[in-house]
Image (cartoon, helix red, strand yellow):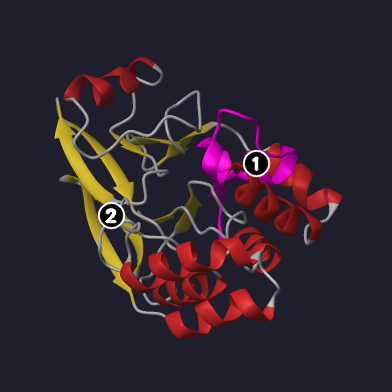
């Protein structure tokens, strides 16, 4: 079996279309989305429609929850709250009630059969909460704690931190596909993961896909995306990283 895993699209349709085109050449059996589909990008509706059309499984991301119900104080830095609420209002205005219900109703986690004997456990950030960031250099015990939620799984896949990585502990794989729409690892290309299962185990392969970044930057202006967010999103699109702290 071969599974494609995508995550953290954030309304970037240019990147998502490029990734889906690449997936179409890989002879996959299914596609899994780990959340953060629409919020924080100029094409929330288009990205949601593509995910609904081309994926077989999806889980709830924190940004999906924000799109549906708004951003609460304390969930983002105070200095960013006004800007991000404007972005949320832009996103919500382009989505129907049915769309918002779909996002809010996504499961926090999923058990996915990967073969007759192998199971994959999927979630956005942690098994029970789509908000806490678990970085690639987190202690081993942080990853091991996820096995309490599903001890049968051979592989655990999560998103949220926008950085592709994997770790093997106690014979189990812990994997992050990186971000389709807003990479933070210094490579501006869209990132996703292929998982192949054979008689020897589960084999991960990370993919990076070039897409039309200037066109994506232009979409911010074309769609009337809140102007305060343009410099931040443009920097991430062009550099594949957050801007330096001042």
Q: Percent x, y for residue 180?
A: 43, 62
Magenta stretch containing residue 68, yes or no? yes
The magenta-colored residue range is 55-80
Quarter assignment of residue 75: top right
57 up-or-down from 74: above or below: below
In the drawing, what numbered circle is on residue 19?
Answer: none
Q: Percent x, y for residue 246?
A: 32, 52
Q: Residue at x 35, y 56 (%)?
A: 242
Q: Percent x, y for residue 216?
A: 52, 78
| Cβ atoms under marks 2 and 1 closer than 8 Å | no
100 up-or-down from 227: above or below: above
Mark 2 vs mark 1: which is more N-terminal?
Answer: 1
Quarter assignment of residue 49: bottom right
Residue placed most toward the observer, 15 or 29: 15
Residue placed most toward the observer, 222 or 245: 245
- Residue identified by numbered label 1: 66
Magenta stretch containing residue 79, yes or no? yes
Which-is-in-front pick, marks 2 and 1?
A: 1
Label 2 crowding class (10 Å Cα cut-off): few <14, some 14-19, many 20+? Answer: some
- Residue identified by numbered label 2: 196
Q: Percent x, y for residue 72?
A: 65, 31
Q: What distance separates the C-alpha of mark 2 from that of mark 1?
A: 33 Å
Please tell me how many numbered marks the rendered image carries: 2
Quarter assignment of residue 63: top right
Give the left or right position of residue 233, taking residue 240 as reference: right
Residue at disc 2, secondary structure: strand
């Amino acid at each position: 079996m071969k599974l494609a895993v995508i995550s953290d699209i954030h309304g970037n349709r240019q990147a998502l279309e490029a990734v889906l085109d690449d997936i179409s050449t890989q002879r996959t059996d299914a596609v899994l989305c780990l959340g953060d589909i629409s919020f924080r990008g100029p094409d929330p509706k288009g990205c949601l429609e593509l995910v609904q059309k081309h994926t077989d499984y999806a889980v709830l991301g924190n940004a999906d929850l924000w799109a549906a119900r708004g951003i609460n104080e304390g969930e983002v830095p105070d200095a960013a709250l006004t800007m991000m609420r404007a972005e949320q209002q832009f996103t919500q205005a382009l989505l129907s009630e049915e769309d918002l219900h779909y996002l809010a109703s996504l499961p926090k986690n999923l058990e996915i059969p990967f073969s007759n004997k192998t199971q994959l456990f999927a979630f956005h950030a942690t098994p029970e909460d789509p908000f806490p960031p678990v970085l690639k250099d987190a202690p081993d015990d942080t990853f091991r704690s996820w096995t309490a939620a599903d001890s049968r799984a051979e592989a655990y896949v999560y998103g949220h931190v926008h950085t592709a990585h994997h770790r093997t502990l106690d014979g189990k794989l812990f994997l992050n596909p990186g971000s389709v729409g807003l990479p933070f690892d210094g490579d501006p290309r869209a990132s996703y993961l292929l998982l192949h299962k054979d008689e020897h185990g589960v084999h991960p392969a990370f993919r990076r896909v070039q897409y039309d970044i200037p066109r994506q930057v232009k979409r911010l202006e074309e769609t009337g995306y809140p102007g305060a967010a343009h410099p931040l999103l443009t920097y991430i699109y062009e550099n594949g990283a957050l801007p330096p702290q001042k």
